Amino acid sequence: MSVRIPMLAALAVLSLGAAACTEAETEKAEAHAENAGETAEELAARTGEVVEAGAMKAAQAVETGAGKVADKLEAEQAEAAAEGKAGAIDPATDQRVPAN
């Protein structure tokens, strides 16, 4: 949508000034407007790729961090279950240690 706004603005300017311009001037202005639209579209595509790459890196970092937390919690639960602490879940069996 943001790519359309510069193009629409350029077209509006062209249509308002078309009566006062020669055909050559109008064609030149249209060519500039088309180039501006293409440039804006290319920049929007690049920006999208940069944003997507950043989101991917953030998701990977979250995934790595969550994996580390899960590993730590699993080790703590295994230890608690081995010690017979009530309520702990043994990760190997997925069984909760009963209260005595």
Image (tube, grey):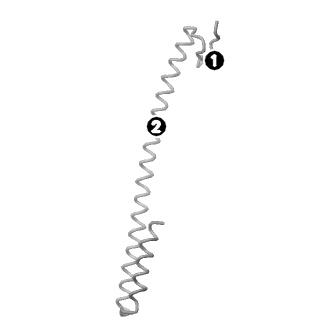
Q: Which residue is mark 2?
A: 62
Q: Residue at x 51, y 27 (%)?
A: 70
* Depth order, front residue of 63/22: 22
Residue 61 at x, y = what percent? 43, 38
> Gap in Å between the C-alphas at discs 2 and 1?
27 Å
Q: Residue at x 60, y 11 (%)?
A: 86
Residue 36 lies, with reference to residue 26, above or below; the image says above
Residue 9 at x, y = what percent? 42, 76
Density class for disc 1 (Cα within 10 Å; few <14, some 14-19, many ≥20) is: few
Residue 41 lies, with reference to residue 24, above or below; the image says above
Q: Assign the C terminus to one quadrant of the image.
A: top right
Residue 87 lies, with reference to residue 69, above or below; the image says above
Three-letter amino acid code at the position of disc 2: Val
Three-letter amino acid code at the position of disc 1: Thr
Q: Could you tell me which secondary element the residue under label 1 belongs to?
A: loop
Density class for disc 2 (Cα within 10 Å; few <14, some 14-19, many ≥20) is: few
* Depth order, front residue of 97/38: 97
Residue 95 at x, y = what percent? 64, 17
Residues tagged 2 and 1 counted as in contact (Cβ below 8 A): no
Which label's residue is closer to the chain start, 2 or 1?
Answer: 2
Q: Residue at x 49, y 32 (%)?
A: 66
Residue 81 at x, y = what percent? 57, 12
Q: How many marks?
A: 2
Q: Which residue is mark 1?
A: 93
* Depth order, front residue of 10/37: 10
Examine the image and state in which quarter residue 21 appears. Answer: bottom left
